[in-house]
Image: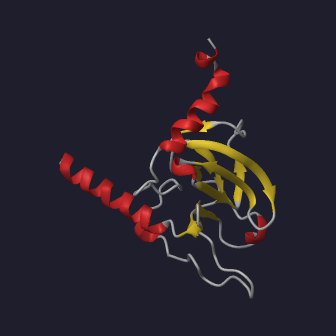
Amino acid sequence: MFWNSRWAEVPRAMWEISRMPPPTALPVPVEGVAARRIADTFGAPRGADRTHAGIDIFASRGTAVRSATRGIVTDVRESGLGGRQVWVQGPARERYYYAHLEGWRDGLARGEVVEPGTVLGYVGDTGNAKGTPPHLHWGIYGADGAYDPLPLLRAGAEGTAAGSAAAD
């Protein structure tokens, strides 16, 4: 009976997701933004002591931010450089970081199982982005730390274009 209950969903999903391979292509997590319009700022200097551990995806304030992959919401918080942020643990135990959010989707909570396209929050300028054009800071952290997510978005766009061409 337990395995069919709501309480079993998270451990079962965590086990399934952790066994999935890391993605080779992902959708852009900001509604209406094309991968080709995103500048690759990963690794750019940010002050004297750090580099940019993600990419910035600019969009109008309040634009929906969606989960790029299946995963478990591991944190919903407001703190530090990222301001309002969401962390999702996805395939291969990689962690997805969504930061500078204007706000979170109503009811979003730790332990929620999300699918690709699930709304997490909305583009903003919180944290150290206050006063800058609204954007999502998006990062992926694997076993060896942060890595550049833009190639995955570009691969996702190519796959979408190929799929659209095949359907024509």
Q: Does 33 sit above or below residue 48?
A: above
Q: Is residue 41 left or right of residue 37?
A: right
- When asked about the image quadrant of residue 154, the answer is bottom left
Residue visible at 74% across and 48% down in the picture: 76
Looking at this view, is 78 or 13 the one in front?
Answer: 13
Q: Is residue 163 left or right of residue 21?
A: left
Residue visible at 28% across and 57% down in the picture: 161
x and y percentages locating residue 157 in the rendered image: 36, 59
x and y percentages locating residue 23 in the rendered image: 44, 54
x and y percentages locating residue 164 in the rendered image: 25, 51
Q: Does 38 sit above or below residue 107?
A: below
In the picture as drawn, the residue positioned furthest to the top comes out as 1
Residue visible at 64% across and 58% down in the picture: 97
Q: Does 136 sit above or below residue 69?
A: below
**Is residue 70 visible in the rendered structure shown here?**
no
Q: How is the structure coloured here?
A: secondary structure
Residue visible at 69% across and 57% down in the picture: 101
x and y percentages locating residue 122 in the rendered image: 64, 52
Looking at this view, is 101 or 41 the one in front?
Answer: 41
In the picture as drawn, the residue positioned furthest to the bottom comes out as 48
